[in-house]
Amino acid sequence: MRDAESYETFGELRELPSHLEIPAALWIGALCAALAGLATGLAEADRCPPERALRCAFFAAGFLYGFMSLIDFAEHFRIEKQLTGRYLGTRFVPLGESVNHLLTTACVVGIFALARPLTAPLETRDWVLLTLPALFLAFGVRDELVYHRRRSYHREDILHTVSHLSSGVMLACYLPSALVDWSRFG
């Protein structure tokens, strides 16, 4: 446990350590990913205005999630290479964390594959679909609390958290888009 005096307030922080700096190219890449998603949503001219707005948010968050996830994985490999001399080592990213990431990705893929307008009675696939966001949340929380809190001084941790936030927004926008009959809002 640290003493209160050993913490710096936000106002006292002057410069980030170099390993926590976010390069300008990353900021630009993230902005471009989000804008490309926004443009994709706007290009769906055949949809009614409320659905188009939802799709803009969905694609912006989805493209940002994809971009940040790729950068996060690159950070994993880069740091692993620095520590072990191998990109596929398990000193920085333990095997359990990699499995956790695969399970989180499987939840996202499962949501896209199973989502459809719901009708009564619900089929097994519908029940699976409806549990996937909770599983995604559980794996995300586990990832942060078990693995990332131990390395919270790495830039990779900041990137990873942003990708989780983006994916949450993406999923929140996707579900209504897939489950609501938008034609009546025309």
Image: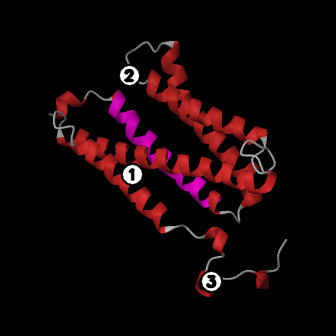
Which label sits in the foreground, 3 or 2? Answer: 3
The residue sitting at 58% across, 70% down in the picture is 21
Is 176 covered by the magenta stretch? yes
Q: In front: 91, or 179?
A: 91
Q: Residue 89 at what x, y percent from top left? A: 78, 44
Q: Identify the secondary structure beneath mark 3.
A: loop
N-terminal label among 3 and 2? 3
Which quadrant is home to the C terminus? Answer: top left
Mark carried by residue 33:
1
Q: Identify the secondary structure beneath mark 1.
A: helix
What amino acid does circle 3 point to? Leu
N-terminal label among 3 and 1? 3
What amino acid does circle 1 point to? Ala
Which residue is the site of mark 2? Answer: 116
Which label sits in the foreground, 3 or 1? Answer: 1
The 10 Å Cα crowd at callout 2, few under 14, some 14 to 19, many 20 or more, is some
N-terminal label among 1 and 2? 1
Q: Main secondary structure of the magenta part?
A: helix
Q: Residue 181 at what x, y percent from top left? A: 26, 27
Q: Is residue 68 above or below residue 7?
A: above
Q: Residue 11 at what x, y percent from top left? A: 58, 85
Q: In front: 125, or 28?
A: 28
What amino acid does circle 2 point to? Arg
Give the CA distance from mark 3 to mark 1: 30 Å
Which label sits in the foreground, 1 or 2? Answer: 1
> What is the residue that sits farthest to the right in this orientation?
1
Q: Which residues are magenta?
A: 157-178
Q: Residue 152 at what x, y percent from top left? A: 71, 62
Q: Is residue 101 above or below residue 17?
A: above
